[in-house]
Amino acid sequence: MVKDRPTIADVAARAGVSKGSVSFALNGRPGLAQATVDRILAAADELGWRPSNRARSLSVSKAFALGLVITRDPAVLSSDPFFPAFIAGVESVLSRGGQALVLQVVTAGDDEAAGYRRLAQDGRVDGVFLSDLRHEDPRIELCRELGLPAVTLNRPEGSSPFPAVCLDDRPGTVEVVEHLLALGHRRIAHVAGPPTFVHATARADSFVATLADAGLEPAGLEVSDFTAAGGIEATRRLLALPERPTAIVYANDRMAIAGLGAAQQAGLTVPDDLSVAGFDDSELAEFVHPGLTTVRADPYAFGEAAANTLNQLIDGTGDVADVELPPARLVVRRSTARLEES
Amino acid sequence: MVKDRPTIADVAARAGVSKGSVSFALNGRPGLAQATVDRILAAADELGWRPSNRARSLSVSKAFALGLVITRDPAVLSSDPFFPAFIAGVESVLSRGGQALVLQVVTAGDDEAAGYRRLAQDGRVDGVFLSDLRHEDPRIELCRELGLPAVTLNRPEGSSPFPAVCLDDRPGTVEVVEHLLALGHRRIAHVAGPPTFVHATARADSFVATLADAGLEPAGLEVSDFTAAGGIEATRRLLALPERPTAIVYANDRMAIAGLGAAQQAGLTVPDDLSVAGFDDSELAEFVHPGLTTVRADPYAFGEAAANTLNQLIDGTGDVADVELPPARLVVRRSTARLEES
DNA sequence: TTGTACGCGTTATCAA
DNA sequence: TTGATAACGCGTACAA
């Protein structure tokens, strides 16, 4: 019934060698005659033996797993378009190599640090991804303290002991703004994410900078929270301005799609009365009405790169270089249009 | 620098007892004098000792982790509103108990079974969640074969060796349809998910049945794929029917929101010309324009229940009962309205 | 190439 | 009853 899994001893016995030799053969280490290696591998194959993760974990003190902690507002545990694709990218690296991904979803109220502590102290993972990087992110110090290898998704300002895998948010933002400027817009507003996040301020800053290059000031700058509800609120405030913006650039698609709804609810027609742009190119962006002009990154590639980098760091072979991914690109759809002279 | 973690031997030495006794004390097993137990626990506390997961894993042959494999179309690695909340619910159970969640995202092209095999054979997890349950789901047989404990999210038709945690999709669907009937609609169509999925057919079947109870036939029945793109296609086909439906019930919000866009793109006004309803109550449902009438379940509770049930099964204490969760409830918003006589 | 200690708890056996 | 001892789970690594 319960087919006892063969152990390394079984393989050794069958091949007529010692356990040590089996281990050497499997890991392709020198010091064994080729004939012996073949015999051992054949024996392993016949028995269907695969080394036990648990035993390996214990003896080499590694988990063969990486960790991802996602902190989310419990009320808004909704879908971030980033993570599924990011995780798939991570997975594509881990599955070769027999690693696993340990996921923790921490609701924002909880102690986030506890999540990382658990992962580290329980020896669950060999390293973690630091996503949604924040300014002065306390997790960097925490991971250092815990001796937990990490890669940051995007680069912190200060010095960091960890490699960074970056996808520059600025070029995409610049493209959006320039696209709107080319369409004749002059009163352009931005709905930003929480300024604690590096990517939120990167987008907001380059929004402002691009306008400044054109000799303009933002027609409005709302700090929101990346949620749909927040997008609605911010949009309402912007639409109530005495000098109503003719275009709004949102820091993500969720806020943009919600903002689209808010504008329509307010009786405006998009894009005739208001141009709207998002960021992420989430699945729905293409299909809402009108289709959302937005910026598309490649979270899958992000995941791959992050996993590879983290593994390099863990394997400790020399210095690990930061990775710069190709930036997000503008995707023009129907929600942005030439400003009508009226 | 590297503070060697204390081992059970250190604790034993400090308390002046044997390793075995420390283990007994920690696990609250009988056979030790209370005074000894106290002394041991105090010693453990002073040393900050916590048993090593890895050693425990090896000796008791358990992973102390549960697994979730999500299969997704690579093109549409978008976010299902269900999973983040579901996972958070699972997590809330696992974090007490020191368990972890191992996640795998398998793109649909890949060999899904390989994912489960890896999890089982690598001893990564003690059990898995079978989500997105399909008819004649091969994973049930696979898990049985692998000796991998599982819980099914929703109940398969045939007999299953595994407990089921169910959230009945039918009452919510019935509510939607009755809501539309009460608004005077008679030509109501449905956009279903792939019929391979149990929840897709449950929704479609109860849609048809509820109409039949009212002496009506569906004004259209499109089989789609739960994606936004699919929702668009299906909507276009329905709107092209000679007898155009006055209301469309979608099997999920993503299709519904996309359908909303398609209808608007076709020049229709929702809800004046067409009522639209979804399923899930995803974050955006409330904020698109018009707000989407939909059905709300509680995926967080689903996750909690599933984790608890799976743990019971793994602990093997007696029979594990199926769990029936409170059904999803109708949430009425602006996308459905009384049928105008015209 | 082999033998064996080691990583670290758990549990069965046995003595007091 | 109370507690110690030793075997066990399964590879890895180093001395021989």
Image: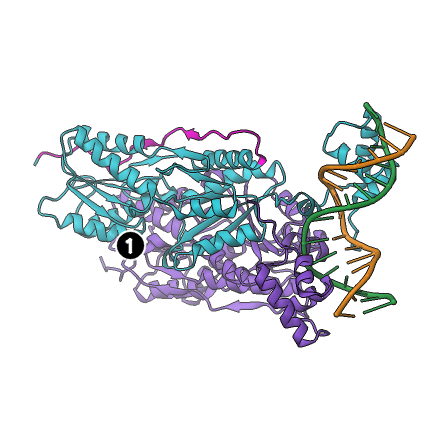
Chain colours: A purple, B cyan, C orange, D green
Q: Secondary structure at mark 1?
A: helix
Q: What residue span does the magenta drawing correspond to?
A: B315-341
Q: Quadrant of residue B289?
A: top left
x then y, percent, for residue A156? 60, 59
Q: Main secondary structure of the magenta part?
A: loop
Please determine whether, in this image, residue B273 is positioned above or below residue A134.
above
**Visible residue check, residue B33:** yes
Q: Which residue was labeled with disc 1? A: B229
* Picture residue at 7% right of the left edge, 36% below the top: B342
Quadrant in the rendering for residue A237:
top left
Instruction: Looking at the picture, tell me which residue is in the foreground, A21 or B310.
Output: A21
Could you say where residue B340 lies in the image, as x and y percent from the top left? 12, 34
Quadrant where the N terminus of chain A sits is top right
Near-viewer residue (B31 or B53): B31
> The residue under label 1 is which amino acid type?
Ala
Residue B14 percent across, percent down from the top left = 87, 39
Please indicate, yes or no, whether residue A262 appears anywhere in the rendered image. no
**Residue for point 41% across, 42% down:** B82
Q: Is residue A197 shown left or right of residue B183? A: right
Chain ID for label 1? B
Q: Is residue A76 left or right of residue A96?
A: left
Q: Residue furthest bottom?
A: A34
* Percent x, y of residue A303: 51, 60
Q: Is residue B254 magenta?
A: no
